[in-house]
Amino acid sequence: METRGFTLIELMVVVTIIGILSAIAIPHFRMQILDSRVMGAKAYLMQIATKQRQFFLREGKYCCTTDNFDEDLLNQGLGLSVEDAGDFCFAFVCSDAGKCNNPTATAFIAPVEAGDPAIEFEVWAVLRQQNATTINAPRSAQCKMSASKRPPTNWVQASGTSDPGREGQAIVLRYPPPPNGIDAAAGDRSLKYVWNEGISATSAMQP
């Protein structure tokens, strides 16, 4: 029996199809990996929020007394351990002098909207790419790394690139949590933030 192989045109069609499928699938796969890495901050955000609420029940105000963007002060005031989270710098944002030992002028990541509970605080996990003592954070803030912080693992993109997951972008936990879904109004970086159980990775996942 005669054995028939593939023609050059047939091979070119197959290669073209594979290329198209790869061009579609690879960016989606990269975003899935980024999402899993970004959400590695979730446990730390929840830990900080829980410690702050416990502190408030004891002291009548949220910690801390000086710089809420200094990890060492948060560690000391709340008994935290965030040194292992080398890809993030953590900050606490609270602007109500009646609820905060150290109210900050830094605005929340996005405004409160109709139907949202009044914001008491936000915790930010700011993406970190370089082994520096401070990094730029949302709302023109500066986040200060703990002196014992582990170095970043280098999956975060450098600031100034067009990639998502860049240094200075943040994953945010808000308390009390807003309703799940997308905000109607834009917040930091003119983004409309998407909330799920009080957490938004919109900033971190957008270029």
Image: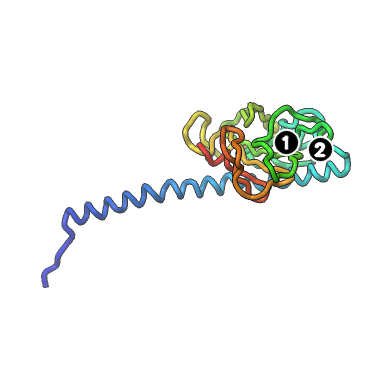
Residues at circles 2 and 1 in contact by the CB criterion of under 8 Å: yes
* Residue that extends furthest to the bottom in the rendered view of this protein: 1
Q: Position of residue 26 (x, y in %)?
A: 41, 48
Q: Is residue 19 left or right of residue 81?
A: left
Residue 137 appears in the rendering: yes
Asked which secondary structure carries label 2, the reply is loop
The residue shown at (14%, 67%) is 3
The colour scheme used to paint the residues is rainbow
Residue closest to the eye, 119 or 9: 119
Q: Please give the residue where the numbered disc 2 appears in the rendered image.
A: 62
The residue shown at (66%, 27%) is 142
Label 1 crowd bin: few (<14), some (14–19), many (20+), radius 10 Å: many
Q: Please give the residue where the numbered disc 1 appears in the rendered image.
A: 92
Residue 127 appears in the rendering: no
Residue closest to the eye, 44 or 177: 177
Q: Is residue 56 left or right of residue 205?
A: right
